[in-house]
Image (spheres, rainbow, N blue to C red):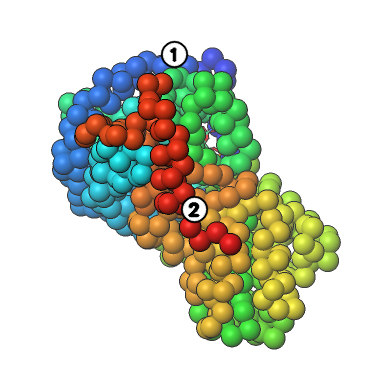
């Protein structure tokens, strides 16, 4: 069965969200126009002021009440996620457990991270006090993808709200009902003002949000759309945080625990049908352990199954157009000397794709160079760890990576040019609220999660205040004739020592 993109005509004012496994309509939503989006941002302005004035303690109390609602109604929400996004209920529960953990952390750490603090005023301004605080931008636009339809946008929404901003959220056209659940439950704990609003529609609605006057735009999605978002935001110098795709490498060193490595590679590559920005896509295994590792992965991956039933390990490919990309990558790998040790072209059975493990794929193949976003893994044999690092880094992407090694894990991790690395596990960094998440190069820039994630949604404000009149006043035309000599003496005494 094939679920096709049911895009409405140009004159349509609503669209249907479909269950990707069955094609059943799960909800009908407005296609918001540019005027609708601007109106939402205007409604958000006074709400942002009110929310900011609630203070850290007031916001923390509301956000923790929201956290409790999400936690207490997890089963209901997970079922809804399963219906609209297709992922198994168990996976949706895992996603929600991350969401509540991050929401709790962001609300609890906003004051310490962003609140006013004194800093040293230094030598030249020693008669001043100096303080730093982080001020919320005002209204933040959040554009999210469908693959982790709660965890991913909430990486921006939780942190932006905790920092004191109002948020206008545009979920993917594939997951508006999930977005609506979030916004509706937030309104239960913040009924006074539209601090978190939902806008729905397709790309043009997202594009309208970029130019709607928001004070910051947080985008998560593909690199191609991220570039469009950044270009649109450039017109008004609207700052952006851009979280895009990846082609994450997984290194198996000569001293790796091969059972643990195979388990992590199979889960990291196939869970969520491979539709994970930081999923395992390319494995580099050192020659001395390669054959044994491939055998272990083959055995494990052969037992994994995608499907729409309760026993399936993962669900359908959410976005119908992704099926063509997955097929193209498998074809390209096989046409250029690659071999499938699990599955093959016949594994593509839209809307499901069964696991595919490919070996001997040339590094120039699209299966290695482009984000596949499907349940496929390539495994390449490398001479040693140094070659693994070189190939892992040879990518336009740099989001996450994993290393399996008993003794060399940290050393290898230090050589990888990606935003996040997990040693002897896969994707664990995303579970740690205190660790910033994001990438380099085509994977984007800026960070969600952790203190950096809070600071992403507030601008630093630096203030000095005179405490006493200094005899050393340099910020005046009316200084004593020998002031220059005094400054020279002071600077030399303070900074001139230690020179060879
Ligand atoms: P897309 O780039 O297709 O879409 C992302 C969002 O942008 C959607 O809400 C989409 O709306 C919207 N959009 C589309 N066109 C425009 C436009 N011109 N201006 C503004 N917004 C627009 O990504 P996907 O939804 O397909 O998500 C998958 C991608 O997201 C993968 O590349 C994945 O790696 C990446 N990702 C990155 C993560 C990270 O944290 N680094 C986490 C999760 C995913 P609509 O859907 O209505 O078209």
Q: Residue at x 68, y 71 (%)?
A: 388
Q: Position of residue 415 (x, y in %)?
A: 61, 67
Q: Residue at x 37, y 15 (%)?
A: 39
Q: Position of residue 465 (x, y in %)?
A: 26, 32
Q: Position of residue 317 (x, y in %)?
A: 56, 50
Q: Badge 1 is on which residue?
A: 35
- Up the image or down, 482 lies above or below 362; here it is above
Residue 290 placement: quadrant? bottom right
Count of marks overlaid on the render: 2
Q: Nearer the viewer, residue 422 or 222?
A: 422
Of labels 1 and 2, earlier in sequence is 1
Q: Which mark is residue 422?
A: none
Q: Position of residue 455 (x, y in %)?
A: 37, 42
- Up the image or down, 48 lies above or below 350; here it is above
Q: Badge 2 is on which residue?
A: 496
Which residue is outermost to the front?
A: 482
Q: Residue at x 37, y 21 (%)?
A: 478
Q: Is residue 176 left or right of residue 266?
A: left
Residue 393 placement: quadrant? bottom right
Q: Is residue 155 left or right of residue 403?
A: left
**Any part of residue 132 in sight:** no
Q: Is residue 125 left or right of residue 358?
A: left
**Any part of residue 97 in sight:** yes
* Crowd class of label 1 (few under 14; some 14 to 19; many from 20; radius 10 Å): few
| SS at circle 1 | helix
Label 2 CB sits under 8 Å from any ligand 1 atom: no
């Amino acid at each position: 069965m094939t679920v096709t993109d049911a895009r409405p005509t140009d004159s349509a004012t609503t669209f249907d969200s479909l269950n990707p496994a069955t094609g059943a309509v799960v909800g009908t939503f407005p296609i918001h126009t540019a005027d609708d989006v601007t109106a939402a941002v205007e409604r958000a302005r006074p709400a942002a002021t009110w929310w900011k004035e609630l203070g850290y303690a007031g916001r923390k109390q509301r956000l923790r009440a929201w956290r409790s609602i999400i936690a207490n109604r997890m089963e209901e929400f997970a079922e809804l996620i399963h219906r609209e996004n297709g992922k198994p209920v168990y996976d949706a529960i895992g996603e929600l457990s991350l969401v509540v953990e991050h929401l709790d952390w962001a609300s609890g750490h906003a004051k310490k991270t962003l609140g006013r603090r004194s800093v040293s005023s230094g030598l030249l301004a020693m008669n001043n006090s100096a303080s730093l605080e982080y001020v919320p931008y005002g209204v933040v636009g959040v554009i999210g993808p469908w693959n982790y339809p709660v965890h991913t946008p909430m990486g921006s929404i939780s942190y932006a709200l905790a920092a004191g901003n109002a948020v206008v959220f545009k979920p993917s056209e594939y997951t508006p009902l999930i977005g609506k659940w979030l916004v509706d439950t937030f309104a239960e704990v913040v009924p006074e003002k539209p601090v978190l609003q939902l806008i729905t529609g397709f790309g043009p609605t997202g594009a309208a949000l970029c130019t709607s006057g928001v004070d910051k735009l947080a985008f998560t999605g593909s690199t191609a759309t991220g570039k469009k978002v950044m270009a649109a935001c450039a017109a008004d110098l609207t700052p952006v945080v851009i979280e895009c795709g990846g082609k994450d490498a997984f290194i198996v060193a000569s001293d790796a625990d091969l059972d643990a490595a195979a388990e992590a590679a199979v889960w990291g590559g196939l869970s969520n049908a491979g539709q994970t920005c930081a999923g395992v896509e390319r494995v580099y295994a050192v020659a001395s352990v390669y054959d044994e590792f491939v055998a272990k992965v083959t055995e494990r991956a052969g037992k994994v199954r995608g499907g729409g039933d309760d026993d399936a390990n993962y669900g359908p490919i959410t976005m119908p157009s992704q099926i063509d990309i997955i097929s193209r990558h498998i074809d390209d790998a096989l046409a250029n000397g690659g071999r499938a040790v699990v599955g093959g072209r016949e594994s593509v059975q839209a809307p499901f794709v069964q696991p595919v493990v490919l070996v001997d794929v040339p590094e120039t193949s699209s299966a290695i160079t482009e984000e596949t976003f499907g349940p496929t893994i390539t495994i390449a044999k490398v001479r040693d760890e140094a070659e693994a690092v070189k190939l892992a880094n040879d990518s336009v992407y740099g989001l996450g990576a994993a290393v399996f090694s008993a003794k060399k894990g940290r050393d290898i991790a230090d050589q990888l040019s990606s935003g996040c690395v997990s040693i002897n596990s896969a994707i664990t960094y995303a579970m740690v609220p205190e660790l910033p998440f994001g990438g380099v190069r085509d994977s984007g820039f800026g960070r969600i999660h952790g203190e950096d994630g809070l600071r992403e949604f507030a601008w630093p404000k630096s203030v000095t205040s005179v405490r006493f009149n200094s005899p050393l006043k340099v910020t005046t035309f009316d200084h004593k004739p020998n002031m220059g000599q005094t400054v020279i003496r002071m600077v030399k005494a303070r900074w001139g020592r230690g020179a060879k």
